[in-house]
Image (cartoon, rainbow, N blue to C red):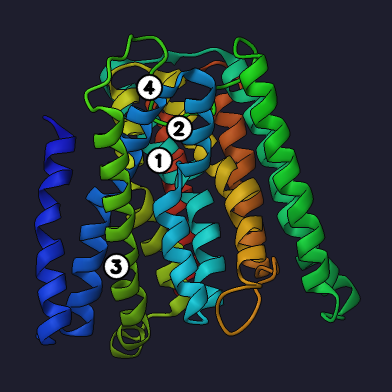
Amino acid sequence: MDFKKIVYFFLIVIPIVALGEIFHFLTPTLALGLAAVGLIPLAGLLGEATEELAIHTGPRIGGLLNATLGNAAELIITIVALQKGLVELVKASITGSILGNLLLILGASLLLGGLKNGTQHFDRRVTGLAATQMTLAIIALAIPTLFVRSIGDASNVLTLSKEVGAVMILLYGLYLVYSFTHESEAPHVETGIDHNEPHVAKWTVPVASGILVAATLGVVFLSEVLVGSVEEVVAAWGLSEFFLGIILIPLVGNVAEHLVGVTAAYKNKMELSLAISLGSSMQIALFVAPLLVFISLFVGPGPMNLVFTNFELIALAASSIIATFASQDGESNWLEGAQLLAVYVMFAFGFFFI
């Protein structure tokens, strides 16, 4: 089954949403649902266009492109949300993205890959450095929250968030440098590229660039629709803005990349699958989250800090620990995948009641 063709079929909803915005015949719930569905193939096109450009530009510049644009769709959605003042939605989406990659996607990969191929093996070096980076990222994300909880004074938390964010971005940059200069010792930062198979570009540079621009504009448009419908949907369905940020936004922005990771595990390419799930979560934690702190200074009604709820911090720490345990021995099985999925579902239940 060609998952890409199925995903790209949903591009048909984009003109429907556009007409709905012009003639106002969509309810807020339907507008949000269709916008979410339309964002899925656009996120896939963003990733595929980036990978095509990476083939033309060579491994180092291509790796930088993939590392920078790997979560472009979700970044655009969150910037639009910041412009509308939905700061809690944005911070929830950061938590949800990390949890989704470490528990939901890694869990689904281990489960399906294990059921299909039995016990699967991979190089422990692929996960070791990434696991260390994720632990450092969780510590960094926790510092502003622990500061507020301990001191009880939030007057300096924005300054602290900016300082911590700058260090996080620096650390992510150092990780990229190390990855590009020690390719045999570090997991690849590229997402969705299998380095064990030769790659031939399907698109020329102008075509790939054009698709990248068009997909980006499409993501901006659908993000405006989705975020603009959030408040009315929250009021109509009794859901919290926080819950939508935790569950919906991360899935919409990353589902195409997630399908690549799960499919890779099903094909017994566990190193690629792990690089996608661990690499994406690391990028969100060390690059996207602190970058949004600085972007919020220029867009929206107010700045964003890195203060999270206690339950979010517990969930982030627990997901990092259990993902490390599941991947540190160089082999995986379907039971470990089921365990990760069970933890994700239990946390989702908890977030529903917050």
Secondary structure of residue under mark 3: helix
Which residue is found at the position 66% from the left and 59% from the top?
313
The residue wearing badge 1 is 105
User: Mark 1: few, some, or many residues within 10 Å (few <14, many ≥20)?
Assistant: many
Between disc 4 and disc 3, the foreground one is: 4
Q: State the mark number for residue 276.
A: 2
Residue annotated with mark 3: 221
Q: Residues within 10 Å of mark 4 (few under 14, many from 20)?
A: some
The spot of residue 327 in percent (x, y) is 55, 26
Coordinates of residue 73 in the picture (x, y in percent): 39, 53
Residue 297 drawn above or below residue 201: below
Task: Please name the amino acid that badge 4 sits on.
Answer: His
Identify the residue position indicated by label 4 in the image: 56
- Quarter the N terminus occupies: top left
Residue found at x 54% / y 21%: 60
Q: Earlier in the sequence, mark 2 or mark 3?
A: 3
Mark 1–mark 2 contact, CB under 8 Å? yes
The amino acid pointed to by label 3 is Phe
Marks 1 and 3, how far apart at CA: 27 Å
What element does badge 2 sit on? helix
Q: Residue at x 32, y 50 (%)?
A: 213
Q: Which of the 4 image quarters holds residue 296?
A: bottom right
Q: Residues within 10 Å of mark 3 (few under 14, many from 20)?
A: some
- Name the N-terminal-most of marks 4 and 2: 4
- Mark toward the start of the polypeptide (4 vs 1): 4
Classed neighbour count for the residue bearing mark 2: other residues with Cα under 10 Å, few (<14), some (14–19), many (≥20): many
